[in-house]
Amino acid sequence: MSKEDVILEIAHVSKTFYPGSINQIEALKDINLTVRRGEFITLVGGNGAGKSTLLNAISGYFFPDAGSIKVNEKDITFLKEEKRAPYISRVFQDPKMGTAPRMTVQENLSLAYRRGEKRTLKFGTSKEERAFFKEQLATLGLGLENRPSADIGLLSGGQRQSIALLMATLKRPDILLLDEHTAALDPKTAQLVLELTDAKVKEMGLTTIMITHNLQDAIKYGTRTLVLHQGKIVKDYQGREKANLTTEALFAEIQTLAISDLY
Ligand SMILES: Nc1ncnc2c1ncn2[C@@H]1O[C@H](COP(=O)(O)OP(=O)(O)OP(=O)(O)O)[C@@H](O)[C@H]1O
């Protein structure tokens, strides 16, 4: 793999919560992961396996205790979360987290469009920007391009999550993190948002890491699937092995790990 192919390099990353106490949790144990440009990684594993903690370390929500994280060869291990915004964007499970409720659809998009820029007192949108936002909203297929002045707080969870996805990708991120971003939606809406996600990822060629508990989705959308267990990557399905992976085999793998925990 040439250096140009690598977009994210995680080396020996560990994170322990409540170290030294009886409640000590080793959430990440010596994680090593090299992500190639354009990969769509799906991250699966049981409850408490460390999936969100891994995304938190990548997004800078907290810093790891050990190891390093590089994006495009730049060491971002201890870069503040807001300083990573130009490189990394994230969509959370809760639709409320990705959008500002008391602002309109257009104002939310405008905020996202200024991501990573210095804040100024000037807050307005040009005619060109409004046309661009309208065009982008139309790609969601929800008719929201006709409702730029609607308050985000009044929209449905699916509409909000679609806008959160749009906001996360409006300014092309190097890495898109999806933290169970469809888990709070009803099954039909979840599928729609996933299809939308997949279309955006493909159209923009985005490097993506998605946490999901839906093994079928993990296989369908991921070009590579990682299984996390007790803070470690215990399986890395890619290439031919990924192509041949079935939901049943992945389910059996996770079941075996869960059973091994009992003994
Ligand atoms: N901020 C935190 N403070 C203390 N403990 C934490 C914190 N974040 C995570 N943990 C603990 O670290 C472990 C890994 O949690 P994490 O949320 O990463 O798991 P997960 O694989 O995302 O699980 P789930 O599928 O249930 O969301 C868990 O035992 C969790 O309780």
Image (spheres, grey):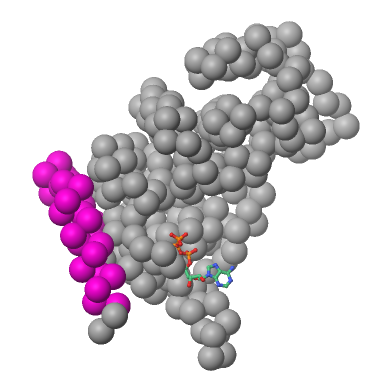
Image height of 183 relative to 262, above or below = above
Left or right of residue 248: residue 52: right
Left or right of residue 215: residue 59: right
| Residue drawn at the location 56% of the way across and 90% of the way down | 21
Q: Is residue 222 visible?
A: no
Q: Quadrant of the C terminus?
A: bottom left
Expressed as whole percent of the image width and height from the top left, the position of residue 173 reads 51, 36
| Residue drawn at the location 34% of the way across and 55% of the way down | 44
The one nearer the camera, 29 or 250, is 250
| Residue drawn at the location 52% of the way across and 43% of the way down | 184
The stretch of residues the image draws in magenta is 235-261
| Residue drawn at the location 30% of the way across and 37% of the way down | 221
- Tell whether position 260 is magenta: yes
Image height of 130 relative to 31, above or below = above
Left or right of residue 130: residue 166: left
Q: Is residue 100 visible?
A: yes
Expressed as whole percent of the image width and height from the top left, the position of residue 201 reads 40, 30
Expressed as whole percent of the image width and height from the top left, the position of residue 253 reads 20, 61
Q: Main secondary structure of the magenta part?
A: helix
